[in-house]
C-alpha cells in the first residue's frame, strides 16, 4: 500500500474525531479556525488551543469571573447570561454556585478544579506524576504546498499514524495551500525541514 493510500484510509477512520477544544463550526470560524474539505482548524492542536485561549479570555471579560467563564465555555455564554439575569430578577446571588444549570455544567468546573489541584500538588492525593522536563517537546514547521502527508511522515522518521496523531487537522492526503504548519518532535525539526526543502527542489512534490 502506498503512503498516500494509507494516509487516505487513516483519514477516513479519523473522520468522526471530535475537535480538541470542541468548537462548533460557527464559533470556530469566529475565532479564526479555517474549515474546509482539506483542513479543519478545530482539530489542529496549535490553532485550536490559541483560539480557545482567545475565547476564554473573551468570556472572562464578559463575566469578570473564571468560574462563570468556564461554565459559559461548556454551556454557552447566552445560557449563563440568562441564568444570571434570572437570579438577579429573583434577588439571588450571581455567583456560579448559585446558578441553576444542567448537571453537566454543574460538574464541569469542579472537575477542572480537581485536575488543577492534583497536578499542582499531587503529594496531597498520594499520586506520583511522571517527570516532564520544562522544555519544548514539539515544534511547528511550515507545511509547503505540494507535500503529501505520507512523504512528510517519512521525512520526520515517524509512522504515518503517529504523524497524523500530531497533525489531525488535515482532511486530505496533501497540502495544497500555503499557511499551514506541521507539528513534529523538536529534536527532528531541522532534519525534517531540510528533507522537505529537498523534496520541493527535486520536483517530486504534488502539483495541482
Image (tube, helix red, strand yellow):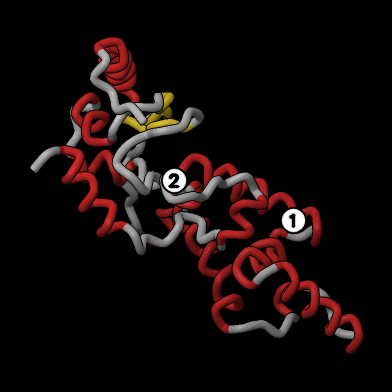
Say few, some or many: other residues with alpha carbon within 10 Å of mark 1 (under 14 / 14 to 19 / 20 or more).
some
N-term-proximal mark, 1 vs 2: 2
Is any part of residue 202 visible from this angle?
Answer: yes
Residue 95 has which mark?
Answer: none
16 over 185 or under it: above or below: below
Residue 132 coordinates in the image, percent (x, y): 35, 37
Which residue is rendered at x = 38% and y = 32% of the image? Answer: 182
Q: Are marks 1 and 2 in contact (CB under 8 Å)?
A: no
Secondary structure at badge 2 equals loop
Kindly indicate the quadrant of the structure image that contains residue 68.
bottom right
Kindly indicate the quadrant of the structure image that contains residue 4.
top left
Is any part of residue 120 visible from this angle?
Answer: no
Which residue is rendered at x = 36% and y = 31% of the image? Answer: 208
Say few, some or many: other residues with alpha carbon within 10 Å of mark 2 (under 14 / 14 to 19 / 20 or more).
some
In the image, 3 versus 90, the foreground residue is 3
Secondary structure at badge 1 equals helix
Does 2 sit left or right of 203 as displayed? left
The residue carrying mark 1 is 60
**Which residue, as the protein is rendered here, is positioned at the far left?**
1
The residue carrying mark 2 is 39
Does 158 sit left or right of 196 as displayed? left
33 over 65 or under it: above or below: above
In the image, 58 versus 29, the foreground residue is 29
Which residue is rendered at x = 77% and y = 80% of the image? Answer: 83
Residue 101 coordinates in the image, percent (x, y): 66, 82
Residue 185 coordinates in the image, percent (x, y): 31, 29
In the image, 72 versus 78, the foreground residue is 78
Does 176 sit left or right of 2 as displayed? right
How many angstroms separate mark 1 from mark 2 (CA)? 29 Å
Residue 91 coordinates in the image, percent (x, y): 91, 86
170 over 73 or under it: above or below: above
Amino acid at each position: 500500500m502506498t503512503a498516500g493510500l494509507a494516509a487516505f484510509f487513516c483519514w477516513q477512520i479519523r473522520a468522526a474525531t471530535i475537535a480538541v477544544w470542541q468548537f462548533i463550526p460557527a464559533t470556530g470560524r469566529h475565532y479564526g479556525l479555517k474549515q474546509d474539505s482539506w483542513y479543519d482548524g478545530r482539530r489542529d492542536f496549535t490553532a485550536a488551543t490559541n483560539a480557545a485561549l482567545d475565547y476564554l479570555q473573551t468570556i472572562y471579560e464578559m463575566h469578570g469571573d473564571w468560574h462563570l467563564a468556564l461554565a459559559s465555555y461548556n454551556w454557552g455564554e447566552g445560557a449563563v447570561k440568562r441564568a444570571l439575569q434570572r437570579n438577579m430578577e429573583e434577588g439571588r446571588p450571581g455567583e456560579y454556585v448559585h446558578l441553576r444549570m444542567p448537571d453537566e455544567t454543574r460538574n464541569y468546573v469542579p472537575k477542572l478544579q480537581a485536575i488543577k489541584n492534583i497536578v499542582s500538588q499531587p503529594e496531597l492525593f498520594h499520586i506520583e506524576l511522571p517527570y516532564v522536563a520544562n522544555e519544548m517537546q514539539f515544534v511547528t514547521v511550515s507545511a509547503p504546498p505540494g507535500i503529501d502527508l505520507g512523504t512528510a511522515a517519512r521525512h520526520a522518521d515517524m509512522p504515518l499514524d503517529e504523524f497524523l496523531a500530531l497533525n489531525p487537522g488535515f482532511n486530505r492526503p496533501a497540502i495544497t495551500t500555503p499557511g499551514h504548519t506541521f507539528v513534529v518532535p523538536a529534536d527532528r525539526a531541522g532534519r525534517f525541514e531540510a528533507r522537505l526543502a529537498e523534496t520541493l527542489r527535486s520536483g517530486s512534490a504534488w502539483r495541482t
